[in-house]
Amino acid sequence: MKFKRAAILSLSILTIMSTDTVAPLVGQISASFPDVNPTLIKQTITLPSLMMIFFSLISGQLVKVISKKAIIAIGLGLYTFGGITAGWTQSFT
């Protein structure tokens, strides 16, 4: 039971981490991409939250077809893949 609580806590922390890790870096991102619209750069803070809302609705329906563990594994895999590929990009878009 202790591991289940730790898993739920770690998954809930992801929603906080997505905005808190990017927000202090907005200035550095703006300096790295000076010709990109500042509003577009600020969207890097709001976009993860919007995606979480959208995919939480989808995952609620997917639980009827796929197991919860599989959905969590797929979601964490996509989260990791998105974070790694964002570090390799050369352009902002």
Image (cartoon, rainbow, N blue to C red):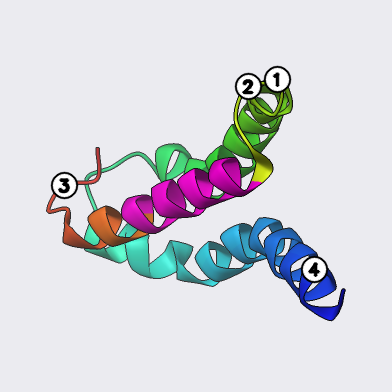
Say whether marks 1 and 2 touch (CB < 8 Å). yes
- Label disc, if present, on residue 4 of the rendered structure: 4
Please name the residue that numbered disc 2 is placed on: 65
Amino acid beneath label 3: Ser
Q: Is residue 11 above or below residue 55?
A: below
Please name the residue that numbered disc 1 is placed on: 61
Q: Residue at x 70, y 69 (%)?
A: 10
Say whether marks 4 and 2 touch (CB < 8 Å). no
**Camera-side residue: 24 or 21?**
21
| Horizontal arrangement in the rendering, residue 20 relative to residue 81 (left or right) | right
Residue interval drawn in magenta: 69-82
Q: Position of residue 62 (x, y in %)?
A: 64, 24
Dominant SS of magenta comes to helix
Q: Residue at x 12, y 53 (%)?
A: 90
Return the disc, 1 or 3, that comes first in the chain's sequence.
Answer: 1
Q: CA distance from mark 1 to mark 3?
A: 35 Å
Quadrant of the rendered structure where residue 46 is?
top right
Amino acid beneath label 2: Val
Q: CA distance from mark 2 to mark 3?
A: 38 Å
